[in-house]
Image (tube, coloured by chain):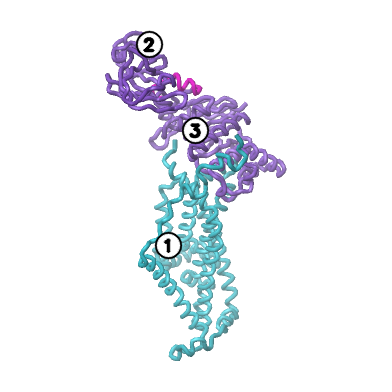
Amino acid sequence: MTTLDFISVRKTFGTTVALHSFDLDVREGELITLLGPSGCGKTTALRIAAGFEFADSGAVLVGGADITRTVAHKRNMGMVFQSYSLFPNLTVAKNVEFGLRTRNVAPVERHHRVAEMLELVQLTPFADRYPHQISGGQAQRVALARALAVQPRVLLLDEPLSALDAKVRTTLRDEIRRIQTEVGITTLFVTHDQEEALAISDRICVMSQGQVEQLGTPTEVYRTPTTAFVARFVGSMNEFRAEVTGPGEVAVAGSRLGAPGAIGFVTGTTLSMLVRPEDLSLGDGGLLGTVTSVTFQGATTLIGVRVDVFDQLVSADIGQGAADHLQMGDRVSVLINGANAVCEPA
Amino acid sequence: MSLAGLDDPLNEGPPTAPTALAPAPVGRPNNSFARLVPNVVLIVAALFFILPLLALARFAMQKVPTVLWDWDTLFDKWSLKPLAVAFGEPEFWPAFRLSLKLAAGTVLLTMLLLLPTAIWVHLRIPRMRPVIEFVTVLPYMIPAIALVAGIKLVKPHARWFLNSDLSLIPFYVVLALPFTYRSIDAGLRAIDLRTLVDASRSLGSGWLSTIGRVLIPNLRTAIISAAFLTAAVVMGEYTIARLLLIDSLPPYQRILVGTDTQAGFGLNLLALLGTTSLFVFVSVLTKKRDRKRKSFAYAATQLAASQEPSPA
């Protein structure tokens, strides 16, 4: 069984704390994404897993075995890097073969494994090309094949898509997920792109300032963020000033609504209430405002509304029927669904 | 969706060739004056290099006194005999062989010391690079005679070492440092060192294997340049060899100039042409390879540079 566990891992660089008591368990065959802004410690965690950095304290376990002090080349981890990491002096096939040669795998087995890996990433026709003769997307696929060829215990992906353009990024993202599922390898994926994280992960670990803010499935992280940071970082949010009027009930500009996120706050407390665009709708008795933008998005339409009472711009994701005839300048009434709202003291 | 075909969307995207990331080509200057200046500079530089060599060649291989030298005698009495004399001297071949041994030893020691050091500095203490650069340039700023004075001081205590012909090697390593370090440093800057090292280590390679299988092949141009620069320094170093009474090629050349001036200068000319040919050869040899790899290395280093401040 190959699992990856971080237990109270701490890492500092000089006076900067990169990881502060970081705990994470990646289950067998699972793909967990470390998601967070630059400097949150996600790459440091990955490099500690790879053995390029050592934890100041805490432990890293793979399949239950402590590898905290094991050097990188003895960890048997496969890693794909953000920048093109192919060896420029070797062909695609030789790049894939590199790790197998290091492990003194017999030539017949080596050739078989290289062919298998190139087939997996569908680059067999490119076997004899050099890295400068293939595109960025192909280079990352070769890097993936190279990492998988050595049959690593854990696959580590350090923002492997960030150097690619949007179209290639989406295709390769799906390709990575397909291969990961096919191979069934335990995977740790680092990105700062929330869309990427939501699309590819079994679970997402949102990080901030060297700590885990929330660990959950993409749906949990998106629909029920546990902290305001997660709510703001994953997806877009509208922020309203609200006053607690009772247990799980708030008033926004005089209108009362249920907000389970407000449970635990004392009546009269002023809150900042975070609401997703899809939790806003149009209907009578809401906040009056003027439509400032209408963006057709296919199944839904995103509209911008300047709310009169706050003189504040909010965005609402409206179903096709409700938004069909909306135009900029139209007067509308915006209703808030507080069921999934995240509340924090203002 | 088929991914195997060449029309696969994954075959698109930022190519590793320089089209996406390389700087736009600099436009040619339009006015003729701007075009003329570089050509003039090139011609003057070429004359500065070639004229002394021609003068040296005339002095070494033409038996026409300067007072009688004019257009009519320009091509009279040229002979390769002085060179034959130089090569025929019994001391020449031992001196030449010793210089070759010294060059090979110096290149080897330089690479053994410098390559791991430069890699270490780039990877672990990049902030120390300016300091290291300054230290390596010291042998260039401090005249060789100062080093000689130092050797003189320690000589009585280290005769066992300094009496050996090969004792010159460590001194030559120091003398060649300004050139060799820069060459290796430039080579290391041209590749995405950290990513290549990390990739190699994650694939199971130890440090020696990483240096041998990944870094040296990708630093070949820099290493060859550094090796030839080192060899050029060794083949031309006179002061220390003379002080330690070691009969390498430069002291022999000096002696030959005293006994047979034309033969001595003929040998000097050959040495100069030999060194120049080596550099031209290296330049031609590595140019093609560089052009091929530059695109990928450039894209990779640009990418790495753009992502520099992200330890976390």
Label 1 SS? helix
Depth check: give the residue in front, B138 or B216.
B216
Q: Is residue A21 visible?
A: no
Residue position marked by numbered label 2 in the rendering: A258
Q: What segment carries the magenta color?
A: A216-229
Label 2 SS? strand
Q: Which is more foreground, mark 2 or mark 1?
A: 2
Q: Quadrant of the N terminus of chain A?
A: top right
Query: For residue B306: magenta?
Result: no
The CA distance from mark 3 to mark 2 is: 36 Å
Residue position marked by numbered label 1 in the rendering: B139
Amino acid type at image mark 1: Pro
Amino acid type at image mark 3: Val
Amino acid type at image mark 2: Gly
| Marks 3 and 2 share the same chain | yes
Colour representing chain B: cyan
Q: Which is more foreground, mark 3 or mark 1?
A: 3
Q: Residue furthest front?
A: A325
Chain under numbered label 3: A
* Above or below A211: residue B312: below
Depth check: give the residue in front, B277 or B258.
B277
Depth check: give the residue in front, A155 or A243.
A243
Residue position marked by numbered label 3 in the rendering: A190
